[in-house]
Amino acid sequence: MAADLPEATVQNVLDQDSLKWVFVGGKGGVGKTTCSSVLAILLARVRPSVLIISTDPAHNLSDAFQQRFTKSPTLVDGFTNLYAMEVDPNVEHEDTGGPEGMDSLVSELSNAIPGIDEAMSFAEMLKLVQTMDYSIIVFDTAPTGHTLRLLQFPSTLEKGLAKMMSLKNRFGGLLTQATRLFGLGDEFGEDALLGRLESMKEVIERVNKQFKNPDLTTFICVCIPEFLSLYETERLVQELTKFEIDTHNIIINQVLFDEDDSGSKLLKARMKMQQKYLEQFYMLYDDFNITKLPLLPEEVTGVEALKAFSGHFLAPYQPATSRGTVEDLERRVSILRQQLKDAEEELVRLSRGKHKA
């Protein structure tokens, strides 16, 4: 491979020891959850502790690992250093633990400023995550729109604060009187909400500063070789650039490789179409690490399937027709070596567990 071409794998992400936050995003239905789960598994090999968080309301993380996750970090079965949690971005306000008056003020505010409730629940989650000591955090984000909103949260909260301040200035003691009228004490008034918004804004601003640091944060775009996905990826990359978020990895999923001897016209036509978009991806993102993943005949669910699929993230996939070369044999040997190493580590872990028991 030419030295000036970026590597066609995610190895660069695994090698970047300074990384603290990894976002995995893209259009719905392109395989983000599978990719973020595999990435978390690969990172667990090289990092002391990894947390994968799903902020997608659909919560496919439990399906991917075939294990039930909640809003508290849970150890993934078969691992000692990989944790997963599922966060609903539209948290019901009962969860915030605030009194009724606070809830009604929050809901009033969320009507006035779209996204404020999401911003607040995300801030709560970041606050929680920051108190935990994970070496790296992988976000399996909701479809594109949500991800970009997530990056706008500091300005959303800024608007919320400005709105609160203007209400306070305009109506002075009227708000305080209104809260008393509803039988609520001063501590449940607008000052309490202002304080809460302020502290959340601080958390999000601090984290956003980290998000804008390429040493600490990167965004991996997942897509498929189709027009809409290409268009969506281009929009996402432009938005990320606007928000100063580092992105230099693209994973193209569900690629058909020329290895099928069935002679299916449909398959050949699909392959030709994909080829056109793959060329466009390589042209547009010539300085990106582009990883191509094959379309498999079966779903990738469960830890074993995810581990087996992870080989394609570390070595470019070779179609059956081009297999058999020395380079390919070496590549397959290195994948087998890694699998053997994983199996040995698993055995050591199991035997330790038995001794403890």
Image (cartoon, grey):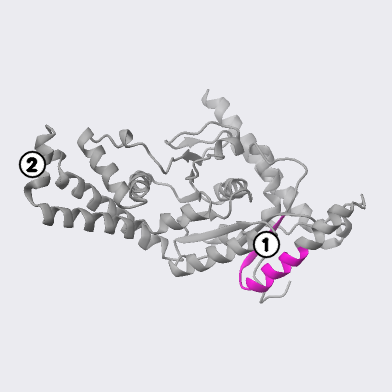
The answer to whether residue 258 is seen in the rendering is no
The answer to whether residue 260 is seen in the rendering is yes
Q: Is residue 252 left or right of residue 49?
A: right
5 lies above or below 96: below
Residue most toward the bottom? 4
Q: Residue at x 60, y 31 (%)?
A: 350
Q: Residues within 10 Å of mark 1 (few under 14, many from 20)?
A: some
- 60 or 229: nearer the viewer: 229
Looking at the rendering, which quadrant does residue 107 occupy? top left
Q: Residue 232: percent from the left, percent from the top? A: 58, 61
Can you identify the residue that label 1 sits on? 227
Q: Is residue 170 left or right of residue 263?
A: left
Highlighted magenta segment, given as a residue range: 275-293
Question: Mark 2: which amino acid?
Answer: Gln
Sequence-wise, the earlier of marks 2 and 1 is 2
Distance between the Cα atoms at labels 2 and 1? 57 Å
Q: Residue 325: percent from the left, percent from the top? A: 87, 61
- 138 or 104: nearer the viewer: 104
118 lies above or below 180: below
Looking at the rendering, which quadrant does residue 72 occupy? top left
- 338 or 238: nearer the viewer: 238
Question: Mark 1: which amino acid?
Answer: Phe
Q: Residue 341: percent from the left, percent from the top? A: 67, 45
Q: Which mark is residue 241?
A: none
Q: Residue 133: percent from the left, percent from the top? A: 39, 46
Q: Is residue 191 left or right of residue 107?
A: left
250 lies above or below 67: below
Can you identify the residue that label 2 sits on? 177
Q: Residue at x 73, y 51 (%)?
A: 335
